[in-house]
Image (tube, rainbow, N blue to C red):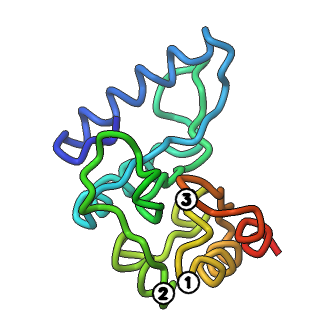
Amino acid sequence: AADATKSDAEVLSVLAALCSQLPSLGITAFCAAVRPHTTDSYARILPRLRAAIGGGVAPRPAASILGVHLDGPFCSSKHAPEGHPSQLVRESLRDSTDALRDVYSEVPSLEGGVALLTLAPELPGATEAIEELNARGVKVGLGRTAARLHECTLAVH
């Protein structure tokens, strides 16, 4: 819905239609998932979704957007989202704050609309990135990963 090539009005129209239809499926709220993109695309997509968080996109009854779910690009190349360009995969979070800013043009935060970010815990710098994101109110999902149990355990402690 938040396609970087669409106008703001088109994006809001698609989001409104989606939010209006979801209650018929029993869905009253959701996180809008964003797959890996270029930094320029994130810079266009995230503000659009941020503006739609909390409702008001469609008349009631409509599902509310709770926040944004950034699904990548910090993932194992073996488990990257199907069909997305391999050049968008980032296999390091070294210097976590800089790595996050380089991709998203800002460090994701709950105040900035990001509720969840999925990353592979085995990536260099992942533990530091998780701590940074948690401090900013962002929940981190471990996914798109080739990690073993001990790497996952380290990431959550």
Residue at label 2?
94
Q: Secondary structure at mark 2?
A: loop
| Quadrant showing the N terminus | top left
Q: Residues within 10 Å of mark 3 (few under 14, many from 20)?
A: many
Measured Cα–Cα span from mark 3 to mark 1: 20 Å
Q: How many marks?
A: 3
Mark sitting earlier along the chain (1/2)? 2
Disc 1 + disc 2, Cβ < 8 Å: yes
At label 1, which amino acid type do we have? Gly
Percent x, y of residue 9: 25, 36
CB under 8 Å between discs 3 and 2: no
Q: First in sequence, mark 3 or 1: give its number.
A: 3
Q: Nearer the viewer, residue 1 or 119?
A: 119
136 up-or-down from 82: above or below: below
Q: Amino acid at mark 2?
A: Arg
Q: Where does residue 38 sit, x and y in percent of width and height? A: 25, 61
**Residue at the spot 48% in from the left edge and 43% down from the top edge:** 33
In front of the other: label 3 or label 1? 1
The residue that appears at 24% across and 52% down in the rendered structure is 85
Residue 91's mark?
none
Callout 3: SS: strand
Q: Can you say which quadrant of the picture contains the C terminus? A: bottom right
Q: Amino acid at mark 3?
A: Val
Q: Secondary structure at mark 1?
A: loop
Report which residue position mark 1 lands on.
125
Furthest-bottom residue in view? Answer: 95
Q: CA distance from mark 1 to mark 2?
A: 4 Å
Residue at the image point whose x is 80% and y is 68% from the top: 153
> Is the residue marked by circle 2 packed among few (<14), some (14-19), or many (20+) residues within 10 Å?
some
Q: Residue at x 56, y 57 (%)?
A: 145
The quarter of the displayed image where residue 121 is located: bottom right
Task: Residue at the far right: name it.
Answer: 157
